[in-house]
Every structure is written in structure tokens, then in C-alpha cells.
Image: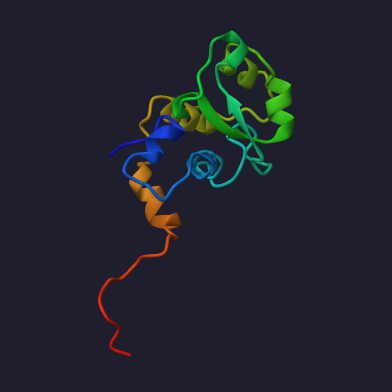
Amino acid sequence: MGHAECWSELMFDLQCLTKGNAKRQFRNFIKYSFGGLCAYCRNNRATTIDHIKPRCKGGSNLRSNLVPACVDCNHSKGSEINWLEWYQRQEFYSKVAQECIEEWITNSRYDIEDYEERIDNRTEVCLTASTI
């Protein structure tokens, strides 16, 4: 299947998932994609989602434009158009973290199916009679 680029892709062939639940699952996938930590500082819990290219500058809500971020980093970056210039000015800058973010942007990280295996907590309905 590949990566879900938009929350609406999670609704495909899943009649039991509401629009709100699909959005929630999509946002949680992004928040926990970097181990639940901020993609930038890697020190704080990711409680927000940052648009790499800000929406006010034409950025999208696609997965490749969204990274998990803590409130401090999200507010500090604000609506800067060039995330890399902002990131390289930060005292917590890390080349490894930069590479991880770049992999995320280019969709060359995690597969959505791997993620679904870890969080698949939906109830399965069995139509056969129980032997108990």
C-alpha cells in the first residue's frame, strides 16, 4: 500500500472508520513516527504536528509535509518557509535528525502497513460458532 499521504486515504475500504477517526489515526501515525518525540529537538514529546512548508505559504496537509513537533519547536519555527535554515540555526541541530526528516519528506521511511501491525487494535468479528 505505501504511505498514506492524506487522512482520507485511511478511509478507503474501511466502512467502520469515521472521518474523525481516520483523521485521528493519521495524526497519531505522524506523532508517533519519530518514536513519539519531536522530529526537531528529539528531547520533548511531540504534542503537535508541524507543517514543514507552512499552510499560509501554500503548504499542504499531506503526510510528506507534516512532522511531529513539540510546542516549543513548532512555535519557534512558526511560518518560516525554509525549515532546514531554521533547523540548522538551533542549538539542538543534528545531522542525523535532519536526514531522518528528509527521508520522511521524500516518503522513504516507514510503511503504513508496518505501523498498522503495531496499532491494530480493532475487534475482529468471527462468524463461526464457538466451540466453548
Residue 25 at x, y percent in the picture: 50, 44
Taking the spot 68% from the left edge, 20% from the top edge, the residue there is 77
- Check the image and report above or below for 29 versus 39: below
Residue 84 image offset from top left, x and y in percent: 56, 17
82 to the left or right of 43: left
* x and y percentages locating residue 54 in the rendered image: 59, 16
Residue at the extreme left of the image, as rendered: 128
Q: What number of labels is visible?
A: 0
Q: Quadrant of residue 106?
A: top left
Query: Left or right: where does residue 9 sit relative to residue 129?
Result: right
Pick the front one: 79 or 16: 16
The front one of 15 and 110 is 15
Image quadrant occupied by the C terminus: bottom left
**Which image quadrant is residue 94 in?**
top right
Look at 43% across and 60% down and name the residue there: 122
User: Residue 75, relative to residue 32: is it above or below?
Assistant: above
Q: Is residue 33 visible?
A: yes
Going by the image, does 14 lie left or right of 24?
Answer: left
Residue at 55 percent across and 21 percent down: it is: 52
Quadrant where the N terminus is found in the figure: top left
